[in-house]
Amino acid sequence: MPIYTPLAFLRTPQSSLALVFCSQILMWSMGWTLLILLVVLTVVHGNPTVTVRTGSGPTVGFDQHPNSVPLGEDIQTTTEGESEVVEEVMTTGVLNPSHYPARRAATVVQHYLNTRYGSPYRWIFLSTVHSVEDVAEMGRKYQLELTMQEMISNVSGQCSAELFFPGGEGQSAPQVQASCEGLHQSNTMAQEEAFYQQHRASNNLVSGNNIPDSYGHMEPSMKPFWQLGGVASSFIMLRESNESTLYNMAQVANFTQLETEKDQLRFNYHVLLHEMISQEIIHWKLLVTWSPEQGVQVLQTELQPKCHHCEAPPNTTN
């Protein structure tokens, strides 16, 4: 009986048919294996859109809220071809007092205090932010500890405040509750009464322009009117503030005293507000009344058309 070597076997016609048959079986088997593998991968990965439950709070980039202590992240990712959209919802926690989110919240408290206690001789400013905590709710709530300073007397006071920015569509004014110790130690009653009596029955109605001027200067007699304009502007800045704004009054463009009515000094003011985030200069006209008994009241406000070539005057007061 002849003995075939492997090479001799491959050269026979029968061996060639067997080899072709085995190759077909192997290719058919590999095709089914690949198909099963694709089905398994589809079941495991599912649809390419992945949604993770989002919590409450507005959509905002973390670059706008860099100082929170992360308590969790809610991210929604959608993949469509090569594009990817990532939605990040702001976390909450303790904020760095020197950064914008904390300063914005504290400045809103400043405007609130001016609407309550301001006068031509009492103008309250933010001095130091000690701590701010951002608390998750529908909208955003901040709890603050800070120092406020009355600019004219330099008297300081420690304040605790709670600030709430409402959520939802449309803008509504933030809600503020604040209590302070020490700010009321300065007694401005004598100065206020003298100013009131001087201008209540005067035949010469006062007016002024560009306070301060382009060099940051103002006449001493104009300071009470500048300060009154600043307090009145706080009514606007409080109402218009949100989590993306930071307002200062830049200048009193002009003011005119009107005739006294119901024992109230009355003024028309045109003020320039500097929105620090957008760097816009925003013009408002205000009808303002004041008396020592009734305090500052803003009866009418009128937003003026945007001035695209206006720049903030130098030495803008915070």
Image (cartoon, rainbow, N blue to C red):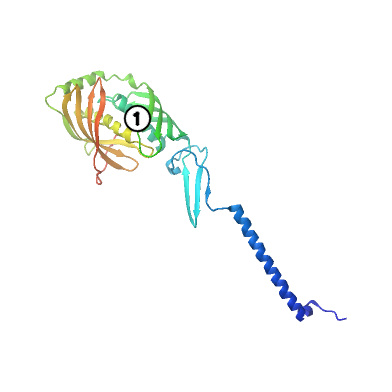
From the viewer's perspective, is residue 299 above or below residue 60?
above
The secondary element bearing badge 1 is classed as helix
Task: Name the spot of residue 119 as percent of width and height, x first.
Answer: 26, 25
Of the pair 134 and 24, the residue shown nearer to us: 24
From the viewer's perspective, is residue 269 above or below residue 14?
above
Of the pair 218 and 78, the residue shown nearer to us: 78
Q: In this orientation, does residue 22 appear?
A: yes
Which residue lies at the image location 24% right of the left edge and 18% below the top edge? 190
Using the rendered view, name the quadrant where residue 266 is placed: top left
Task: Name the spot of residue 188 as percent of width and height, x first.
Answer: 27, 20
Residue under label 1:
110
Q: In this orientation, does residue 11 appear?
A: no
Task: Name the spot of residue 68 as percent of width and height, x first.
Answer: 47, 37
- Residue type, numbered disc 1: Gln
Q: Quadrant of the C terminus?
A: top left
Using the rendered view, name the quadrant where residue 226 is placed: top left
